[in-house]
Image (cartoon, rainbow, N blue to C red):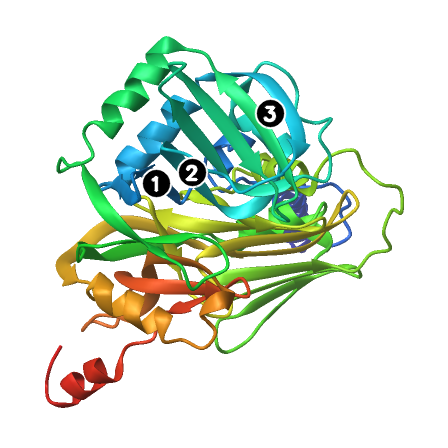
Amino acid sequence: MKLETAKSLLLIILIATSLVLTFGMWNYRPEYEPLSDVESVEEDDLGGDIMQVQDAVKPTDVVFKMNGQFFGYTDPEDSMQFFEDIQQWELTNIQSSDVEEDRESGAEVEIIFPSEVPLSLFDNILNVDSSLTDITNFYTDRMYIDLEEDEETLHVQFVSMNGEQIVEADIPSMSSYDRLLSIFGELDEDDYEEQELLTETDRDIYIPVEQKILTSYSYTFDMIPAGNIRNIMFSNPNLVNVSESAAGSIMYRTDNRQVNISNYGMKFIDVAERNNEPTEKSVLQQSLEDINDHAGFTEDYRLESFTDDSVAYRLFHFQYPVINNSNPDLSMIYQQWQNDQLSEYDRSLISLETVANTSSTDLRESSEVIESIRKDDNAADIQDVQIAYRLTIESDDNGEDYVLLEPEWYQRINNSWSAVPKQNTDAQQNEKGGS
């Protein structure tokens, strides 16, 4: 082969190779976006439910009071169904007045909510024929429905937390009256259980008299992907700095925002300068809209408490509250707001999947719980007493983590939940091998 021919052939091969490489570069799509790209990626959602005020604000107790005795539903599902029925009953003739004397009633239902809320919220919760928003600075945590047998009607009362104001209304429906009258005639049946009133606490608290036997649950679970959280909490995830630790914790941050993901939960903070202009929306409305935007109510969450700038939602399981008290708290969603801007957002990233195991659990006898509370020097400070599920993360023999939910008696003091202390006799029995 002549030298000139070989050179020409080599040149053709080089040109062809160059064309192939150029075409490949034009059509290459990297698996990552360049950090300088200012285009936002599409926001993810968490796959949860959309929740409105009436879904978030639900009672923790429904108590029927008659002739000095107290009764509640044996099954908390029935309490929720009863409250859903009440939400359809129309309240009319709403009036506000000062409290002049102690309330007295023959047959009455007391509906207790987990936190004091402004009366105006009941515009969204109940069926009222006129707005309650004009009644300002009125906070309450319970409502009463009196059975007026002489007039064959139902009378509703809300008493303010300071005990100085009362808002009254009527339920003129005869069918509603008949329904409640029939319930008071059935209180000795199995669907209802007797309760005891704790008189040592500042607020009325009712405890079931009979011992409870509930089910403990072991659940497999999934974690909400960290990438979903990044895409939700940052307007331009491509410009977010990320760092990971050996323990599996992840931190996303920009100049103003930071998200820490660790121990199955997340904590978001935003330290940007705030808008000083007030907003017409309540912090609860802002919070619900924000969490609904990314479908963040991934389990049964209900309002636990809220202030002028913060909201807390608690996880419920089969109508019982769930308590974790770890850091982060895996039983809570918490948000803090400054005007119309979110400044803090803490939540669990656990999504319960399937039941791996169940077992029957005998709770402490109610008499022991009541005696423990009555002997407590701080009994007056107790805000509530509930059966709740204690949530812990455990590992099986294969090293796989699972969620364990165990029922226990809890008390709330200074808005913090802790197990009701056991009596010394219980401790001594445990030392001798009791369970």
Quadrant of res 28:
top right
Q: Secondary structure at mark 3?
A: helix
Q: Secondary structure at mark 2?
A: strand
Disc 2: which residue: 111
Mark 3, Cα crowd under 10 Å, few <14 / some 14-19 / many 20+, is some
Taking 69 as reference, is 234 left or right?
Answer: right
First-in-chain label (3 vs 2): 2
Name the front one of labels 3 and 2. Answer: 2
Taking 340 as reference, is 356 left or right?
Answer: left
Question: Mark on residue 346?
Answer: none
Identify which residue, 134 or 332, lies in the foreground: 134
Name the front one of labels 1 and 3. Answer: 1
Q: Residue at x 63, y 42 (%)?
A: 139
Q: Residue at x 61, y 35 (%)?
A: 166
Q: CA distance from mark 2 to mark 1?
A: 6 Å
Q: Secondary structure at mark 1?
A: strand
Q: Residue at x 51, y 67 (%)?
A: 381
Residue type, mark 1 in image: Val
Report if residue 90 is visible in the image: yes
Q: CA distance from mark 1 to mark 3?
A: 23 Å
Disc 3: which residue: 123
Q: In the displayed orientation, state which residue is furthest to the left.
A: 433
Taking 311 as reference, is 189 left or right?
Answer: left
Task: Give percent across and percent down for residue 223.
Answer: 41, 55
Residue type, mark 2 in image: Ile
Disc 1: which residue: 63
